């Protein structure tokens, strides 16, 4: 057979590509939405470092009237007994977190090393005859 006869007998049937106007419009709208979102995400990621590193203190330090509560000096002082009680409670709390350990790590060898659970021979199929 010659190549010309083979090419003449081969026919391509594109009838399964039934693309109507509705399907084409759905595809075009889908592509447009995807590429628009990709472009918007590109610009968001491009501007993100500037947004993160912006000095927001200028924004919030405007002409606000701050009502400061006067604090008396005697309100801030704590007696020695209270300091001792707090420090003792913290000491006991942090010492209870860790258990007493010997610091010796041992590995015990077992006398029976064979186990059918780890044997690969049971996973093999018998040889066919």
Image: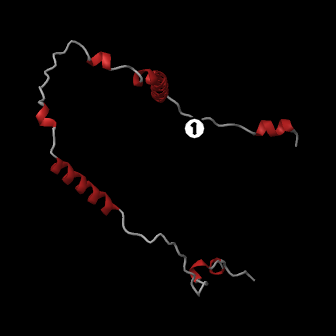
Foreground pick, 101 / 119: 101
Q: Is residue 86 above or below residue 54?
A: below
Foreground pick, 91 / 113: 91
Foreground pick, 107 / 81: 81
Which residue position is annotated with label 1?
Answer: 16
Give the percent coordinates (x, y) of residue 17. 57, 34
Image quadrant occupied by the N terminus? top right
Q: As drawn, which residue projects farthest toward the bottom? A: 111
Foreground pick, 98 / 83: 83
Q: Quadrant of residue 10?
A: top right
Q: Is residue 96 above or below residue 45?
A: below
Q: As drawn, which residue projects farthest toward the top? A: 63
Give the percent coordinates (x, y) of residue 128. 73, 81
Give me the residue at 63% from left, 81% from top: 122
Image quadrant occupied by the C terminus? bottom right
Q: Quadrant of residue 116?
A: bottom right
Q: As drawn, which residue projects farthest toward the front? A: 80
Image side of residue 29 versus residue 18, left or right: left
Local packing at callout 1 (Cα closer than 10 Å; few below 14, some 14-19, many 20+) is: few
Give me the residue at 58% from left, 83% from top: 115
Give the percent coordinates (x, y) of residue 2. 88, 39
Dot 1 falls on a residue whose secondary structure is loop
Image side of residue 5 versus residue 37, left or right: right
Give me the residue at 21% from left, 12% from top: 63
Tell me which colouring the rendered structure shows: secondary structure
Image side of residue 4 versus residue 127, left or right: right
Total labels: the figure holds 1
């Amino acid at each position: 057979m010659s190549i010309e006869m083979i090419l003449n007998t081969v026919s391509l049937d594109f009838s399964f590509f039934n693309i109507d106007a509705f399907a084409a419009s759905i595809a075009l709208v889908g592509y447009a939405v995807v590429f628009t979102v990709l472009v918007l995400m590109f610009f968001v990621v491009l501007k993100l470092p500037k947004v993160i590193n912006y000095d927001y203190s200028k924004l919030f330090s405007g002409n606000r009237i701050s009502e400061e509560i006067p604090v008396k000096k005697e309100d801030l002082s704590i007696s020695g007994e209270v300091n001792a009680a707090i420090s003792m409670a913290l000491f006991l709390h942090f010492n209870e977190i860790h258990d007493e350990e010997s610091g010796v790590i041992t590995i015990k060898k077992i006398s029976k090393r064979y186990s059918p659970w780890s044997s690969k021979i049971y996973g093999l199929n018998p040889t066919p005859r």
